[in-house]
Amino acid sequence: MVKLIPLLQEIRSCQLCAKYLLLGPRPVVQAGAQARLLIIGQAPGLRVHKTGVPFNDASGRRLREWLQISEEDFYDPDRVAIMPMGFCYPGKGKSGDLPPRPECAPQWHQPILAELPQIQLTLLVGQYAQKYYLQDGYKTLTERVRNWRELPENILPLPHPSPRNQIWLHKNQWFEQEVVAELQRRLKKIFWET
């Protein structure tokens, strides 16, 4: 904990990729030394950029539904750590937000992970987190999520919970039946049975 607070302050004042960010840097991260769940997402959207609160949007509502967790627990840094691939809003692209800036993960992820010794489950939300952390050879997010059983018990890949993924969720109804059910089982064990 002694090192985590200064590290989070350093991250929140980061200017590493400021010249690429049209709205300027506003790194969004949440972590506490006692956190048992780590969510590695993509990058803050515009609403999150404005509020500084991770997953404070429609994606966050769906994610909390999948987790079956209250807002109070979700935003408790000693329960849930949230570390995106890109800590700042990357800006708007042709079909949604731009990809996360590539500078953040190599700069900040390992120092944060070193200060989170209690993590029991890591959720890799979206293709950017999955490609960075999983060297599994799968070509698509669908293949990766479908084969979640091949991963260690402490890692679970998820699609991004964005409303833009409604078609994917409709086409892949097995996801909520299998993966979300397994996610809820694991979280119950982590938070309420230990």
Image (spheres, rainbow, N blue to C red):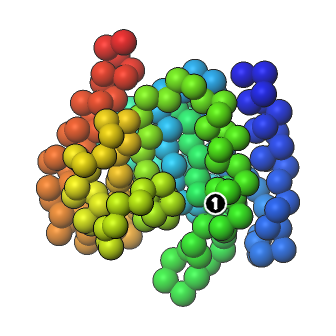
Q: Position of residue 177 (x, y in %)?
A: 15, 48
The front one of 22 and 126 is: 126
Q: Position of residue 91 (x, y in %)?
A: 66, 74
Q: Position of residue 89 (x, y in %)?
A: 66, 64
Q: Is residue 108 left or right of residue 170?
A: right
The front one of 91 and 147 is: 147
Q: Quadrant of the C terminus?
A: top left
Q: Is residue 175 left or right of residue 43?
A: left
Residue bearing the label numbered 1: 86
| Residue at point 57%, 25% (across, down) | 117
Q: Is residue 187 left or right of residue 7?
A: left
Residue 87 placement: quadrant: bottom right
Depicted 191 relative to depicted 64: above or below: above
Q: Is there any visible trace of residue 44 in the rendered image?
A: no
Depicted 69 relative to depicted 42: above or below: above
Q: Amino acid at mark 1?
A: Gly
| Residue at point 30%, 24% (across, down) | 188
| Residue at point 83%, 54% (across, down) | 14
Q: Position of residue 160 (x, y in %)?
A: 40, 60
Q: Is residue 42 left or right of residue 24?
A: left
Task: Report how many numbered discs are placed on residues in the image.
Answer: 1
